[in-house]
Amino acid sequence: MIESHKPLNIVEKHVEVAFSPSTPIGKAVRERIFCLAIEHGFKSNKEFLSFLNEVYRCLASINLKRKFSEKELSIIKVQAAIEETEKILNLLISKIRDLYGVHFPELNSLVKSHMLYAKIIAKIGLRKNFSEERLKEVGVQNKGLSSKIMSLSRSSVGAEIDGGLMENIRKLAQSWLDLHTVLSGLKNKLEEDLMEVSPNLLRIAGLTVSAKLLSITGGLNRLAMLPSSKIQVLGAEKALYKHLKGKGKPPKHGVIFLHPLVRKAKKSDRGRISRVLANKIAIAARIDAFKGENMASDIEKSLKEKVSRITGGKNRNAWARKG
């Protein structure tokens, strides 16, 4: 119970408040809660506890809906699924390369693209099945690369493997391709939700950084309430804590390092660019949260001008690679 010693006046800056953890009536009710429940129609303590459980579940659902909008919750969950899917894809492709490398080790250095590598294995398989026509079908359009693959497939130092193992490797490669398709679908869904919830933020920060910032903070309103200095280091909490303990330098950036304007910049410029970017992200988030207007073009123009002054115009192409 909260007892105020004088009427609350919203004009005043200071209000004296006394806190009382319990009242005699409240204490008496809690002591006799089960007896009162039986007196008011519940058949047993178990039935009353079941009722309380349902009430608490409904309250939790109401609080959750207040805390997050449906789209914001979708963004947070989809971003978490994307991160886990990317981890699985990276682990799986490394195992596929290891397994297939026993049979055709030279292909590993020739084909850097994971997508193309998986397609070659899934669609062609054994070295003896390689041909320029089949390589072209799976996406090897470069004739020079195709000729090198064919030449090395005939002179490879790799070992022969039985058909059963090769079939399992091909299934793994096909599973990787299928999971990558799922990942693309998740990213498309994420972009749709971000466009609806925070179009300004999406335009300024890009897909990955926007989703990660909302995921870390727990929603658009929370992100909008943060100062730009805090946004700048979101995701670098460990480095910040080390610095506060005197064990390292203060971090210049957190997840916003993934933005190409920061990532592609010279190391000496990253701190200043991070501050400018964090400031524009804060503005975009506040507009999305409290105004709902599309002002991304103006924010983007201002950001480009400030970054250009920092870099001397050398970072102009980075914006086109935002994602």
Image (cartoon, rainbow, N blue to C red):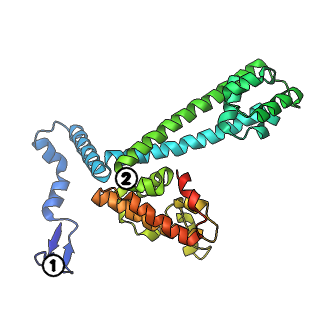
Q: Residue at x 36, y 56 (%)?
A: 220
Q: Nearer the viewer, residue 141 or 43?
A: 141
Which residue is label 1 attached to? 11
Q: Is residue 214 left or right of residue 34?
A: right
Q: Earlier in the sequence, mark 1 or mark 2?
A: 1
Figure check: 13 above or below 274: below
Instruction: Please tell me whether mark 1 sits on a helix, a strand or a loop.
Output: loop
Question: Amino acid type of disc 2?
Answer: Ser
Query: Going 45% across and 58% down the picture, which residue do you hit?
Result: 204
Q: Secondary structure at mark 2?
A: loop
Visible in this render: residue 60?
yes
Left or right for 52, reference 276: left
Please give the name of the residue rendered at 39% of the width and 62% of the height, measured from the top-left corner: 298
Q: Which mark is residue 187?
A: none
Kindly report the distance in space between the C-alpha atoms of the residues bearing marks 1 and 2.
35 Å
Nearer to the camera, 103 or 277: 277
Image coordinates of residue 311 in percent, x first then y, are 59, 69
Residue 251 visible within the image: no
For the residue carrying disc 2, how many other residues have a C-alpha within 10 Å: few (<14), some (14-19), or many (20+)? many
Quadrant in the rendering for residue 236:
bottom right
* Crowding near the residue tagged with mark 1, few <14, some 14–19, many ≥20 C-alpha atoms within 10 Å: few
Q: Amino acid at mark 1?
A: Val
Instruction: Please state which of the two labelled residues, at mark 1 or mark 2, is closer to the viewer.
Output: 2
Quadrant occupied by the N terminus: bottom left
Q: Position of residue 19 (x, y in %)?
A: 21, 71
In the picture of the structure, the residue carrying the numbered disc 2 is: 198
